[in-house]
Image: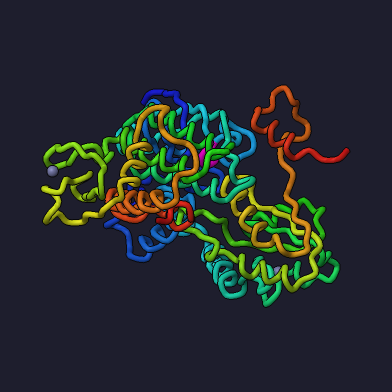
Amino acid sequence: MSTEKSLALVLRLVDFSETSVIATLFTRDFGKIHGLAKGARRLKGPFESALDLLCLSRLVFLRKSSDALDLLTEAKLERRFRAAARDLSRLYAGYYVAELLDELTDDGDPHPELFDFACETLAALDTGPQPVSSVLMSFELSALRVLGHLPLLDQCVECGTEMNGSGRVAFGMLAGGVLCARCRPGKPKVVSLSGAAWQMLRDYAQSDEKRPSGEPDRRAYGEVRGVLNQYLSHLLGRRPRMHEYLGVLAS
Amino acid sequence: MSPSGWCGSPALDMAQLSESVTRLIEEFAKLPGIGKKSAERLTYHVLRVGSHEALALADAIRDVKQNVRHCSVCFNLAEGELCSICSDPRRDRGLLCIVEQPRDLMALEQAGSFKGLYHVLLGRIAPLEGVGPDQLTIDALVERVRTGEFREVIMGTNPTLEGDGTALYISNRLADFPVEITRLARGITSGSVLEFANKEILADALAGRQKF
Ligand SMILES: [Zn+2]
Ligand SMILES: [Zn+2]
């Protein structure tokens, strides 16, 4: 058993008793952990108000053996996610970030880059003015890239032929990327994308500042959503819960 | 095969226990916050005390389940159609406070200063836990506000992200009614000092400042 410290985002809280909770946190340095916070609901104490959903906190915890719950001993609030004060779609978008982090990452598998980007994403949702559609698409594609699930977009997943985006592009859900005209026949679960939609996916999948941040073109966006929604559902084995609540994610 | 385990050692072999004892342990273990060890301790306690005392617990549970239900108007706990608050003619019928659970209502009642009526949501909107607005008593609330004569609706949901989100959802649903919507104040605790308040809590206090 060792004492560890890390910045952490609160992803899930389950009541354990009147005052204690079991929290799922995405820590910057240790990845996803599950810990018991005794007295977390008390006003005074080592957690104050630092263990609410989507809070960014400085966490101190005791690591237990492999399958036991960690014990959270202290949390200091760094930043609270405040979208619930103004805008439901921004709040639900925040929940969606929590859902993806929880579903896509493994316990004890740290990804500091994804952690930092999740914090930036929550800040962008909180303060605006970037549209929710664009913020979420950037986050989804970044998460997929960092975690090694990003579909191959520039070249055919089967044979490596460079795609040039002239005409429509075939995207194979199971193949995990685009398919050239030669490789496409006979592949299951293939959808076809317009050149504009394909370009939008590539733009948002970039890892740097070149990523767009404005209101995405409506038509291409609808197509991209369709592909992304199917791809994520395929990856998670079910439709993400928050899709039902987020009109901006409709294709 | 000594029965000494009954008086302390928790290392009981379940196979040695009678079926009804095992059943009681299992039932206790289903209670919130009660683990296997505590369930065993509670069971030993029941076995130790006199049957009068033990059966009083059983009777109390039966009475609660038979007599207590949700008030048909506000969803507070009630022994009958209406709860004691809804049926009290001295309460201010122009004032409505929305809370998540009956226990929140009880806490506010113990504070003693609120004289209006309540509406208990029986939960909060928690999409990640599979709880949507349809699983709460929000439709009944909207109907109450539509047909009632409330001048003010107070959001008394918990000051958590989900509690605030639930309040925001409800205030959107009530936006078209001629009723003032307020929420409980939050921020710095009375008797504390600014210097030691967390900066986020100070931000809450500033956002919720009021006329002097
Ligand atoms: Zn190919
Ligand atoms: Zn009532």
Where residue B37 appears, as percent x and y from the top left, is 40, 48
Which one is in front, A229 or B165?
A229
Name the quarter showing ligand 1. Answer: top left
Q: Is residue A180 left or right of residue A12?
A: left
Q: Is residue B57 left or right of residue B193?
A: left
Image vertical order of residue A241 relative to residue B212, above or below = below
Asked whether residue A236 appears in the rendered view, the answer is no
Q: Quadrant of residue B63?
A: bottom right
Q: Quadrant of the N terminus of chain A?
A: top left
Q: Quadrant of the C terminus of chain A?
A: bottom left
Q: Residue furthest bottom?
A: B81
Which one is in front, A231 or A12?
A231
SS majority, magenta:
loop
Q: Give the residue drawn at x 70%, y 60%.
A: B175
Q: Quadrant of residue A104?
A: top left
Q: Give the residue drawn at x 44%, y 34%.
A: A118
Q: Is residue B179 left or right of residue B61?
A: right
Q: Give the residue drawn at x 44%, y 58%.
A: A244
Where residue A107 appears, as percent x and y from the top left, is 33, 37
Q: Is residue A9 left or right of residue B149?
A: left
The magenta stretch is A51-55
